[in-house]
Amino acid sequence: MAVINSYEAVFVVSLKQGEDAVAETVNKFKALIEKNATVESVDEWGKRKLCYPINKETDAYYVLFNFKSEAAFPAELDRVAKITDGILRSMIVKKEA
């Protein structure tokens, strides 16, 4: 039996491509997480000012996902985030039990 852990993932999405692209990117990751894990919550923080410019952008859209999954899934989620256009930064952290 596989070990199930709790994780949280934060995605910083570029606003350059417009609101529709932001919503599409958020839905893409929500569907990916739902397919491979149990979603506990999705907290859309919305548009926020960045502490420093990333790719000449000063604002971005933040989304926090809390989910439970097997240990192998966060690595795949991180891989997909790194190759997805529109993701400026991402961070996936295992929560303490």
Image (cartoon, rainbow, N blue to C red):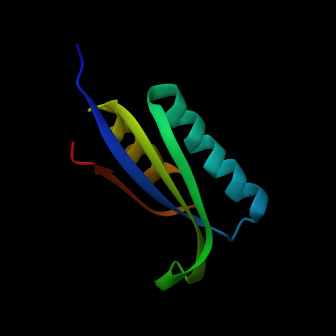
Residue at the spot x=48%, y=49% of the render? Answer: 65
Q: Can residue 85 be seen in this view?
A: no
Whether residue 88 sits left or right of residue 5 in the image: it is right
Residue 12: image location, x then y, percent = 51, 64
Q: In this view, does 74 lie above or below 35?
A: below
Give residue 35's position: percent from left, percent from top: 52, 26
Query: Does 82 sit above or below residue 4?
Result: below
Residue 39 at least partly seen: yes
Say how many tags the image has: 0
**Closest to the observer: 78 or 51?**
51
In which quadrant will I find the N terminus?
top left
Q: Where is residue 16 in the image (x, y as percent from the top left)?
A: 69, 71
Q: In this view, does 38 lie above or below 19?
A: above
Looking at this view, is 58 or 69 the one in front? 69
Q: In which quarter of the image is residue 31?
A: top right
Q: What residue lies at 53% left-to-right and 31% top-to-bottom?
A: 34
**In the visual, does 1 lie left or right of 63?**
left
Q: Quadrant of the C terminus?
A: top left
Q: In this view, does 70 lie above or below 18?
A: above
**Is 97 positioned to the left or the right of 32 in the image?**
left
Q: Find the residue positioned furthest to the top.
A: 1
Residue at the (34%, 44%) spot, across then down? 7
